Amino acid sequence: MRRTFWLSQKRLVELFGVEVPAISKQMKNIFASGELELLERVCEIRSSERRFNHSHN
């Protein structure tokens, strides 16, 4: 079974023990390689944030 989860840049920084620029660089490389499509992922993230915020208000 394939599972997907999303972390904010802040959480990725904490998880990997690096600074924000390192995370930004890696994300740019991932999107540049075509591994992920930026617009599709941004839409998914925003949709997830809305659902989360709605369920926790």
Image (spheres, helix red, strand yellow):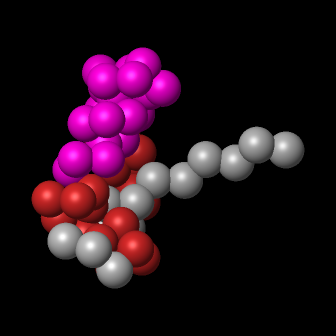
Residue depicted at x 42% and y 19%: 34
Q: Is residue 19 visible?
A: yes
Image quadrant containing the C terminus: bottom left
Q: x, y (%) of residue 49?
A: 33, 50
Q: Is residue 11 visible?
A: no
Identify the main secondary structure in magenta.
helix
Residue depicted at x 17% and y 64%: 20
Front-most of residues 44 and 9: 9
Which picture quadrant has residue 12?
bottom left
Instruction: Determine if the magenta segment contains residue 42.
Output: yes
Q: x, y (%) of residue 18?
A: 27, 74
Instruction: Determine if the magenta segment contains residue 21.
Output: no
Identify the residue at the far left of this view. Answer: 21
Residue depicted at x 61% and y 47%: 4
Q: x, y (%) of residue 31?
A: 34, 28
Residue depicted at x 76% and y 43%: 2
